[in-house]
Image (spheres, rainbow, N blue to C red):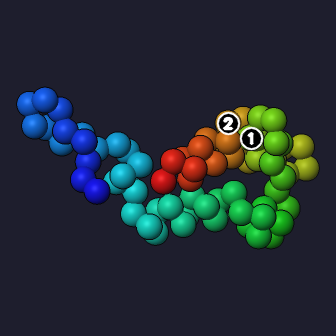
Amino acid sequence: MSAPTTPSGVQVLTAMSTLLPLEVDALRHSISGELLTKMGWSVDAKTGRVSKDGHAIFRAGFATAIKKVLNAV
């Protein structure tokens, strides 16, 4: 399936279509249960904030944004 084009014939690519499989795997790993457990991190399900012992590792929106990207690819 090719990317959509504009009426003038310009091919339109989304940012998601340019991600390499290696990059998608890296994103998936960044919020994986395996990594979170190994690092002692937790994710706030409401805000997507990744923290350890109450201290932010990644601010609110990180995990939720990664999940949205992964759902789009």
User: Where residue 29 sits in the image (x, y, percent)?
Assistant: 64, 65
Marks 1 and 2, how far apart in space?
5 Å
Q: Is residue 25 in view from this perspective?
A: yes
Residue drawn at the location 85% of the way across and 62% of the way down? 40
Q: Is residue 9 above or below residue 34?
A: above
Q: Is residue 24 above or below residue 16?
A: below
User: Where residue 65 sits in the image (x, y, percent)?
Assistant: 61, 41
Q: Is residue 45 above or below residue 2?
A: above
Q: Residue furthest right?
A: 53
User: Where residue 37 sits in the image (x, y, percent)?
Assistant: 83, 66
User: Where residue 67 sits in the image (x, y, percent)?
Assistant: 63, 48
Q: Which residue is mark 2?
A: 61
Q: Which residue is mark 1?
A: 48
Q: Nearer the viewer, residue 73 or 25?
A: 73
Q: Pointer 1: residues within 10 angstroms few (<14), some, or many (20+)?
A: many
Residue drawn at the location 50% of the way across and 61% of the way down? 24
Residue drawn at the location 8% of the way across and 31% of the way down? 8
Quarter of the image for residue 4 reads top left
Q: Nearer the viewer, residue 53 or 8?
A: 8
Q: Pointer 2: residues within 10 angstroms few (<14), some, or many (20+)?
A: some
Secondary element under disc 1, as helix, strand or loop, is loop
Q: Is residue 26 left or right of residue 47?
A: left
